[in-house]
Image: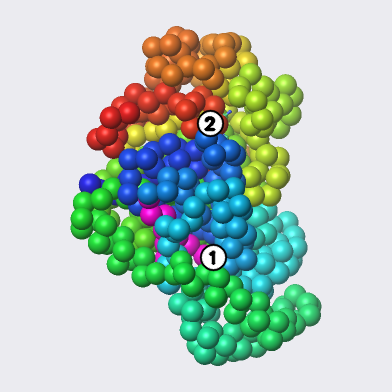
Amino acid sequence: MPAVVVIGGQWGDEGKGRVVDFHSRYCSVIARYSAGNNAGHTVINERGKFALHLVPAGIFAADKTCVIGNGVVIDPEKLLTEIGMLSERGVSTAKLLISQHAHMIMPWHRIIDKADEAMRGALAIGTTGTGTGPAFHDKVGRLGIRVADLMDAESFAYKLKHTLEYKNRVLAGMYGLDPLNYEDILEEYTEYAEKLRPFVADTMSFVQEADARGEMILLEGAQGSLLDLDSGTYPYVTSSVPASVAAGGAIGIGLGPTAIERVVGVYKAYQTRVGNGCMPTEILDGPDMEMLREGVGGAAGTAEYGTTTGRARRVGWFDGVLARYTARLNGVTSVALTRLDSLSAFDSIKICVAYEVDDKRVATLPATTRDAERARPIYEELPGWKKDVTGVRALGDLPTEARQYIRRIEQIVGAPVDMISVGPERHQAIVTRDIFGASI
Ligand code: GDP
Ligand code: IMO
Ligand code: MG
């Protein structure tokens, strides 16, 4: 069986963790292939509610292997905390593998992330402050320290010493900050090394062999395509290399692109964003904004606040222009539409189908921030359904207006919707097509 990639089609937080948790039962290997603990993936299943930042959302099935691939940057402390939290709550991490090729987040990355944001002033990105961006900068700048280095005490001591000399000059000269102490970091990371050693593996070979045996591999994207370095709303994007878009899935796990046969695009039934940057359909205030942010009319306890930072998410209507763009960009073969329940209280619901820029109708987002911020959404308005849908499990049982809304999204995006999520819990889903060749 081939590899399937699950990607976010918007600005992140579309519900990828929830979709991966649902589909992981049909797969042998579930792998993260990019980003770091800037990601926050919520899973609610029979084990409880979990916020995962590095461990793949397939971890709840004890017979599956979960892989943190070469494309991920790992903060060892955060990963060990997450493994500890899972173990304490009775979730086995015995089959978790960590790539020896993955880069690590070092103490200076977290410090630089925050200091750099402050220095940027009006150009601040609104990062998660996790050090993820600076860790990718060092990867590209060939100053990164990888898990394999950590596993070799001599190599780690040498790399740490010389990298820290460089970084302390940056901290002092560029940001006016105190230097970090070599011995302290050496001691701290040596402890992490021993705790992580049992998980470290040649995951590229492992995944390649699983693929050769015909096993199903599920690649769990992080972030959303509009946060992608190349294709997103630059510069208000994240720094992952490889990208979180589907094409990055192959590189970030060590497979060829032909291994990827399907791409599931996860889209919220409306739009959210955390951090800075343009958002043409954003609703800045008023009752619609309140209703979307607090999830009025939908499943309880799912208001729009960030899983990683707790920041209030910006909210707005579904942006069909950007959704069609990201579906094409990723080669989306089917859509998982999440949080349909969160629209249940509206009399009518808007979908953006084009923009107006300088009195002209355009079908793509302008490239510069200044022009993108001037793009005014042109909306179609559809009737709301005004009924609780959290208990619906079959498409035919959804109100007609809800089905109309889904059909319109399929037309705009150009791909079929085969999973509709009507609540955050694993079972709160309507599945209309079996994409894994297994009976549902
Ligand atoms: P991810 O980063 O793409 O995995 O998404 P997050 O977990 O950061 O954010 C998605 C949020 O929506 C979480 O709070 C989920 O529990 C919640 N969620 C997911 N699917 C649904 C749904 O269908 N309905 C509702 N109300 N909440 C959902
Ligand atoms: P998941 O996987 C939403 C955003 C940050 C900021 C920008 C750059 O949960 O969907 P960074 O710390 O990466 O340098 O911040 O990217 N961002 C996310 N927004 N969900 C995420 O991940 C995100 N990861 C990064 O808010 O705007
Ligand atoms: Mg998230």
Q: CB of residue at label 2: within 8 Å of ligand 1?
A: no
Left or right of 332 on screen, residue 174: right
Q: In x, y percent, where is residue 436? A: 28, 37
Label drawn at residue 214: none
Residue extent of the magenta highlight:
64-75
| Snapshot colouring | rainbow
Quadrant of res 164: bottom right
| Relative height, residue 301 to residue 287 (above, below) | below
Q: In x, y percent, where is residue 258? A: 23, 54
Q: Identify the residue at image location x=75%, y=63%.
A: 118
Q: In x, y percent, where is residue 57? A: 48, 47
Q: Quadrant of the C terminus?
A: top left
> Mark 2 and 1 residues: CB-CB less than 8 Å, in contact?
no
Q: Identify the residue at image location x=59%, y=48%.
A: 89
Q: Identify the residue at image location x=39%, y=69%.
A: 201
Helix, strand or loop at disc 1? strand
| Relative height, residue 285 to residue 327 (above, below) | above
Residue 70 counted in the magenta span? yes
Q: In x, y percent, where is residue 170? A: 68, 80
**Residue position marked by numbered label 2 in the rendering:** 425
Residue nearest the viewer, comparing 93 with 129: 93
Q: Amino acid at mark 1?
A: Ile
**Residue position marked by numbered label 1 in the rendering:** 74
The crowd level at tag 2 (other Cα within 10 Å; few <14, some 14-19, many 20+) is many
Residue nearest the viewer, comparing 218 with 356: 218
Q: Amino acid at mark 2?
A: Glu
Q: Identify the residue at image location x=62%, y=66%.
A: 77
Quadrant of res 213: bottom left
Residue nearest the viewer, comparing 183 with 87: 87
* Disc 2 versus disc 1: nearer the observer: 2
Residue nearest the viewer, comparing 179 with 225: 179
